[in-house]
Amino acid sequence: MTDTAAVTAITSLNLSRYLGKWYELCRLPIKYEDETATDITANYSLNDSVTVRVDNRCFDKHGKPFRAIGEATPVDDARSRLKVTFLPKYIRWIPFTSGDYWVLKLDPEYKVSLVGSPDRQYLWLLARSPDLAQDTRERYLAEAKRQGFDLTNLIVPRHTGREVSNDMLAG
């Protein structure tokens, strides 16, 4: 695939089925996201009939719980291309303060998702579980390569079994 070919999102996303917790299994480097963060999760819930609340959590390089709250808005009727904004902007580990979130590949059971941006700078492999069969991982990353993403510097965050709880954030 050449760099001039367009990145393509899936033709339709059932947003209600996409809601809930996802584990970040790998990603491309992002200057605002801590490369050593562990146990990274994203929880999606409806704000209203149009927007989705994005609750990203991880343990930072010092082992401290961290959270960033954002909002995603579908940009078309397919709902597979969203625009995401995170505020406040000074939070370092978030992937972007405003950017594209396109679902590029999704299994029929809504258990594995490949998400990227049309400029190929951002890419995430997400799953409903912190563990994913190697052959499944390879199939999803093959789709990323097919769409022109350079996976040379792919980051695979550790999942230790810990999760950032509301109590940890309140303390």
Image (spheres, rainbow, N blue to C red):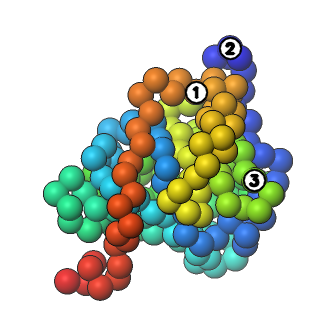
Mark 2 in CB contact with mark 1 (< 8 angstroms): no
Q: Is residue 106 above or below residue 39?
A: above
- Provide the secondary structure element on which disc 1 rests: loop
- Provide the secondary structure element on which disc 2 rests: loop
Q: Nearer the viewer, mark 1 or mark 3?
A: 3
Residue occupying the point 73% across, 51% down: 106
Q: Position of residue 2 (x, y in %)?
A: 68, 14
Q: Would you say residue 50 is visible in this rendering?
A: yes
Quadrant location, the C terminus: bottom left
What crowding class fits label 1: few (fewer than 14 Cα within 10 Å), some (14-19), or many (20 or more)?
Answer: many
Of the numbered discs 1 and 3, the one sitting upstream in the chain is 3
Q: Is residue 20 above or below residue 107?
A: below
Q: Which mark is residue 149?
A: 1
Judging depth in this view, the residue of 93 and 105 nearest the camera is: 105
What crowding class fits label 2: few (fewer than 14 Cα within 10 Å), some (14-19), or many (20 or more)?
Answer: few
Judging depth in this view, the residue of 27 and 69 nearest the camera is: 27
Furthest-left residue in this view:
62
Q: Nearer the viewer, mark 3 or mark 2?
A: 3
- Provide the secondary structure element on which disc 3 rests: loop
Q: Which mark is residue 2?
A: 2
Q: Position of residue 102 (x, y in %)?
A: 65, 46
Q: Indicate the amino acid at tag 3.
A: Asp
Q: Is residue 14 above or below residue 119?
A: below
Q: Indicate the amino acid at tag 1.
A: Phe
Q: Would you say residue 93 is visible in this rendering?
A: no
Residue occupying the point 50% across, 38% down: 122
Label 3: which residue? Answer: 107
CA distance for labels 2 and 1 = 10 Å
Residue occupying the point 41% across, 28% down: 153
